[in-house]
Image (cartoon, rainbow, N blue to C red):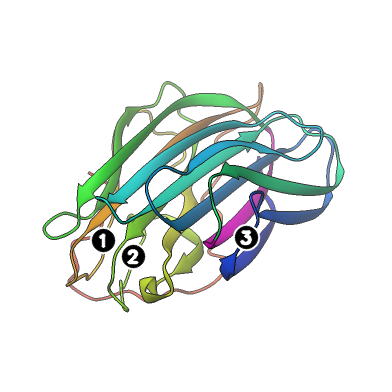
Amino acid sequence: MGLIQTATQVNVAASGTTAPSIVLTSAVAGNTILAFASFWHTGITWTYTNTTDGGNTFTSLAATATNPGTDQTRGVVSVAFNITGGSRTVAFNLSGVTDLYYVLGCLEWSALASVDVSAATSNIDMTSLDSSAGPITTTDAGDVLIGVATQDSGSAGLALASPTSWTNSYRQNDSATYVGMDAGYWVPGSIKTTYTAQWTHNNTAGEWCGGVVMALKPAAGGAAAARVPQSRPFPYKPGSPRGLR
């Protein structure tokens, strides 16, 4: 069980697409696609429908951050197991959008079997609280955890930080470009307990945030993996109250 490859798509300004997508190349049949996204759009009536890639079936969970009466951000985690291999164009399907801003990412993992447990938390007041999701209680000691935090904020420097021990896969810190996101994963290894994922931030503009966390069971016979090394460094603010609670 382990990480095979990653792909990211930077934010796109004022896009009119209703199906923003990201390509994962040379995926291996039987593996798992873990896809994450954060979207910002004016208004609060637009919706996220599902995630597709033209063949595989995705299980998805979304969190919403709504600035009442004006705009809205959504964070999504989608998972497809036992995939068809080859080049996969993963699309997040939306409705009611005209000037969408977004960031997307994909991870390909081997030897994962199913969603163990998941949770989403929406509309957390950023003035005094960090983004979080949970608690979830895992039932398998070999679970892989994946999560995403999303923010609807006017702050130009969110200074997002992942939960303790997580590996960051993509971070968009400049919410002044209308979207903020932190996405990543953690392989605790031989632990079965209750988690709350918490992403810290340094936001003076207030407004709203949300988070999604999923625990994924390993395939039969797959041992709990050692923690996968970070794919890239990311800034950490000493003394900030980061961590899983």
Q: Nearer the viewer, residue 124 or 242?
A: 124
The percent coordinates of residue 70 (x first, y second) are 30, 56
Task: Work out whether mark 1 precedes mark 2 in sequence or the reverse, and give the earlier one.
Answer: 2
- Given the image, on which type of amino acid does mark 3 rest? Gly
Looking at the rendered structure, the secondary structure element under dot 2 is: loop
The percent coordinates of residue 92 (x first, y second) are 62, 45
Residue 151 magenta: no
Q: Which residues are magenta?
A: 99-111
For label 2, count other residues whose C-alpha is less than 10 Å away and answer few (under 14), some (14-19) or many (20+): many
What number is the disc on residue 200?
1
Mark 3 touching mark 1, by CB under 8 A? no
Mark 1 touching mark 2, by CB under 8 A? yes
Mark 3 vs mark 2, foreground winner is 3
Q: How many marks?
A: 3
The percent coordinates of residue 131 (x first, y second) are 27, 52
What number is the disc on residue 16?
3
- Given the image, on which type of amino acid does mark 1 rest? Thr
Distance from Cα at disc 3 to Cα at disc 1: 31 Å
> Which SS type dominates the magenta stretch?
strand
The residue at which mark 2 appears reads as 161
Mark 3 vs mark 1, foreground winner is 3
- Given the image, on which type of amino acid does mark 2 rest? Ala
